[in-house]
Image: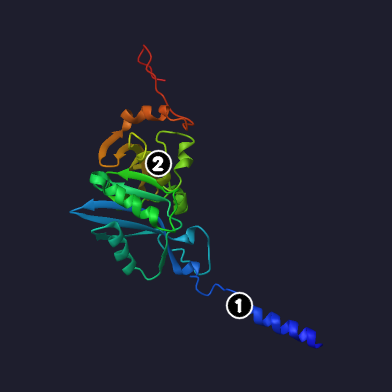
Amino acid sequence: MSQKQIAIVILMLTTTLLLSGCWDVTEPQRMYYVQGVGVDYKDNEYTAYLQIINFANVAKTESANPNAAPTEIGQAKGKTIEEAIYKLYRSMDQEVFWGHMTFLLFSESAMKDEHAIAVIDTFLRFRETRYHIWVYCTQDPIEDVLLVSPLLEKSPTAAKLSNPKNTAKQESFVEPVNLRQLVIGLNEPNHEMKIPYVTVKENWETMDGSKTETVFAGVGILSKDSFKGYIKGKSARGIEWMNDETKQGEITVELENNEKK
């Protein structure tokens, strides 16, 4: 080997030492993935509910436990939403990844007196979260909504709250709203936005008994400084016909002979 070739080999070996690596990256199986977050407010404290997803039903791996629950819910309280989340960090044994968060669920009390504005601002500032996070409200216990699993035991990523557009194609009762649309709407002159209202009902049966499922049952009206209340059920039926994004809906007409079509 000539001196020139030796010099080239030495140069190549030297430059490899300058290459950056991935030594500080956490392995995917050593992280917890947040799919949804619920927020409640009571006795001057926020309660944060974190829905952690189990990817064993999404992508099979050798280290996955097929008998593990599809999702688990953690909760903690704090004077601010950040304080509650950091308390949850202390109870976990792995790093938390927020990049897969798909929805944010508010209780009625969490939307009153500008509490929701502080929560929205917090999640917009997380560098891992995205603007395309769906926003909902409910009067049911937060944990009851977060523990609902999709029909036929499908992956939690296929849940209605994570993919509201799937059902909107067949029945456009309530228009889904994400964080970006919510922030833009609250900054419009009227300062009001319609947030999909969800509830839990036992509409399905299995061999093991009744099964609960989330249902879009109306909208909650949120402004920058207050919560205006709900429009539910039949009272909300006209909203879909005021929306340009409506794909398909249902109208029942009563004829003179009391026949309904």
Asked whether residue 36 appears in the rendered view, the answer is no
N-term mark: 2 or 1: 1
Say which element carries label 2: helix
Q: Residue at x 37, y 27 (%)?
A: 238
Task: Say if mark 2 contacts mark 1, CB within 8 Å.
Answer: no
| Quarter-of-image position of residue 54 | bottom left
Q: Nearer the viewer, residue 19 or 252?
A: 19
- Under mark 2, the amino acid is Ile
Say which element carries label 1: loop
Report which residue position mark 2 lands on: 184
- Expressed as whole percent of the image width and height from the top left, the position of residue 123 reads 37, 54
Quadrant of the image containing the C terminus:
top left
- Under mark 1, the amino acid is Leu
In this rendering, the answer to whether 169 lies above or below 12 is above
Quadrant of the image containing the N terminus:
bottom right
| Quarter-of-image position of residue 175 | top left
